[in-house]
Amino acid sequence: MLHILPVSEQPGLMRQTLTPQEQSADLTLEQLKQLVGLVDYDESNDPFPVTAMDAVVFVVGNATQAAQFYQLALGMDLVAYAGPETGVRDHKAFVLKSGSARFVFKGGVSPDSPLFDHHRRHGDGVVDLALEVPDVDKCIAHARKMGATILDEPHDVSDDNGIVRLAAIATYGETRHSLVDRSKYSGPYLPGFQAAQTWVSRPAGHPKRLFQAVDHCVGNVELGRMDEWVAFYNRVLGFVNMAEFIGGDIATDYSALMSKVVSNGNHRVKFPLNEPAVAKRKSQIDEYLEFYGGAGCQHIALATGDLLRTVDQLRANGVQFLTTPNSYYDDPKLRERIGKVRVPIE
Ligand SMILES: [Fe+2]
């Protein structure tokens, strides 16, 4: 599920610098402050400094069709590809961007691909919430000291475009956080990937992009384990608590959940963590855990500075929305209340 967010005004000193992804997307610090609530913070005291999301990596049943959908419907641009044509035997991977957001869609092509095993257990889903970090080794040393499961030890991968330093730690369910330092790399994604170009054509007047950044990525965890995972992000990744929604805050007759939000120091990376709460009907979190086969990433929230234009275009592109009253987006008076456009998507 994708969740489209309007920008919100948030105070904060601006001593952060733009990431290469933000620079290449022509975003400014002021826009990032409005889009994702970027704040100043002192990285030198952070035991596990995180700069930004590096990528959201999905495993899907048919990567080619997913890549086509995200180009056509979500307006994303294809930037890199790896697969049989580039020497990868068992799977395909497509890298798509919109603003500073990077999504990677991977899917098996040969029946013995390990990706199909994951897909058989979970169906389509997020396998990796990859984080851009300035010092992979420092992060892993701290994570190990704090008792995290290290899935990949720090190592270099390289090609003609330079060197990327990588490692990975485990989080909830079968989800991982890859840690990526691409400061010595100029290629389109990672070694092994070739540059690729959007293959769909868009109708005249289609905006350049429909969203500019990932705002947050939500993890659904088992009943009674939310605080455990909040403590994990506090202890291992040095994340701070931003907000909590307990009991009746997010409850209807049909669903209820408890949620606490953790974020990295500069607030670019925000992870709400949900667990089920009691309601008249089964909690939507229980339904997720049952259908996904355990804890996992429930939704990705996308930041746009032009919510009305984005929603109109997504609808025109065939994207279905969860039910809100039609008047919410159609009624001229309600549209006015959503407010002025702060970061145009053109
Ligand atoms: Fe959300």
Image (spheres, rainbow, N blue to C red):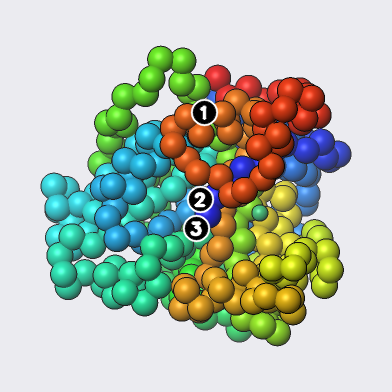
Residue 36 image point, x, y percent? 69, 42
Q: Is residue 30 left or right of residue 128?
A: right
Callout 2: few (<14), some (14-19), or many (20+) C-alpha neighbours within 10 Å?
many
Res 54 label: 2
Q: Is residue 53 left or right of residue 29?
A: left
Which image quarter: residue 75? Answer: top left
Ligand 1 under 8 Å from disc 2 Cβ: no
At label 1, the amino acid type is Gln
Task: Find numbered disc 1 in the image and state the secondary structure of the residue it sits on.
Answer: helix
> Which residue is at a point 48% across and 51% down the rendered structure image?
55
Q: Is residue 136 left or right of residue 189?
A: right
Res 130 label: 3
Which image quarter: residue 45? Answer: bottom right
Label 3 – label 2 distance at C-alpha: 5 Å
Residue 127 image point, x, y percent? 44, 65
Residue 178 image point, x, y percent? 47, 63
Label located before the other in sequence (2 or 1): 2
**Picture layout, residue 231 above or below residue 8:** below
> Which residue is at a point 51% across and 34% down the rendered structure image?
315
Camera-nearest residue between 25 and 138: 25
The quadrant of the image that shows the C terminus is: top right
At label 2, the amino acid type is Asp
Q: Are marks 3 and 2 in contact (CB under 8 Å)?
A: yes
Ligand 1 under 8 Å from disc 1 Cβ: no
Label 2 – label 1 distance at C-alpha: 26 Å
Ligand 1 positioned in quadrant:
bottom right
Label 1 – label 3 distance at C-alpha: 28 Å
Res 313 label: 1
- In this view, the residue farthest toward the top is 204
